[in-house]
Image (tube, rainbow, N blue to C red):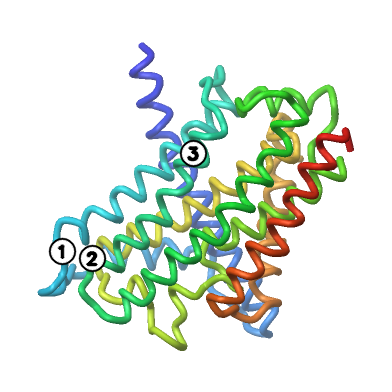
Amino acid sequence: MEILRYFSLIIASFFIFSLVGIMSGWLDRKITARLQWRVGPPWWQNFADFVKLVGKETVIPYEANQAMFLLSPIIGIIAVTVTGALLLSSIFFNPVKWDLFIFIYLLLIPSVVIFLAGSSSGNVLASVGAGRELRLLLSYELPFIIALLVPVIKSGSVQIYKIADYQITNGVNIGYISGFIAFVVALLAFQGKLGYVPFDVSEAETEIAAGTFIEYSGFPLALLKLMKWILLSVGISFFVIYFMGGFRNPLTGILKYLAVLILIILIKNTNPRLRTDQILKFSWGWLTMFGMLAVLFALLGY
C-alpha cells in the first residue's frame, strides 16, 4: 500500500505541477508582454508549443554523447516530479517524513541536468553555456542553503512538515526579520535556478544563441521546457509552504503563490543580464552576507 501511495503521489505531482507550471509560464509571458506594451499570447499558447515540439523530429548531433543527450531531460523531469510529490504530501496527505536536505539535493539536479545536456551535445556554444551553468550553480547554491537554514533554526527541525506546522502557532516565517531577509535571499537564488534574468547567462540568446539547449529539438526539447515549468511551480509552492504558512486555506494559498510568481516576473523584467563574474561577486558577496545576517537574527530570536 505504501508503494501504491508513493506512485500515486508521483503521478499526481506530474500532472498537477505540469498544469500549474505551464499556466505560470503563460502568466510570465503575459505579464512580460504587458510590461513591454504588447498583448501577449493566449492562455493555451504554452500547451500548443509543447504539443508542437512533441510532434517535431528529434535531431541528435553526430558528435553528441547520445545516451546522455537523451537521458538528461528525462532525469530532470523525474527530479522535479519527485520534489513535487513530496510537496503534495505535505499539503494534501499524511506527510512523508522528508527533510530539507532531500529537497536541496533534488533541486540541485535540474541545474546539473542543464550542464550535462549542454556538455553532451558536442556544440561549442552549448559547451560555453554548460560552463556558465556550472559557475552559476556554484554561485547561488551557498546563499540558497544558508537562507533555508533560518526556518530550521526557528522551528528546531529540518523536516518540512514540522516547519510548516510551526508556522500555525508561531506565525509565518516571512513575518520575522530573519525570515523576511532569508525569503528575499532564497528567492534571488531561486531566480538563478530558473535561469531567469539577471541570471540567464547559460541561455543568453544575444551571446550564445540558445546556449545549453541549442542542439535540442522535438521531444527532448519539450521535456526540458516542461522541466523548467514544473521547477517554477514546485519552487514557488515550496516558498509558500516554507516561508508563508502553506496552502491550508486554498484561497489565500493561491494568492500567496501568485504573489511570489509576480515578484519573480518583476525581478526578471526590471534587471539587465549580469556577467558571470558579476553573478559570482553578487552571490558570494551580498547574498551570502545577507543570508548569514538572517541566520544571526534567527539565532537572536528575531
Question: In the figure, 2 relative to 54: above or below?
Answer: above
**Which amino acid, mark 3?**
Gly
Tell me what residue is drawn at x 89 percent, y 38 percent. 302
Earlier residue among tags 2 and 3: 3
Give me the C-alpha separation between circle 2 and circle 3.
27 Å
User: Which residue is tagged 3?
Assistant: 84
Q: Tag 3's secondary structure?
A: helix
Asked whether, in this view, residue 214 is left or right of residue 141, the answer is: left
User: Which residue is tagged 2?
Assistant: 120
- Residue 163 location, quadrant: top right
Asked whether, in this view, residue 117 is left or right of residue 15, the answer is: left
Q: Choose between 209 and 9: the one closer to the eye.
A: 209
Q: Tag 1's secondary structure?
A: loop
Question: In the figure, 293 relative to 278: above or below?
Answer: above
User: Which residue is tagged 1?
Assistant: 65
Q: Choose between 188 and 9: the one closer to the eye.
A: 188
- Residue 8 in picture, x, y percent from top left: 39, 26
Q: Which of marks 1 and 3 is in front?
A: 1
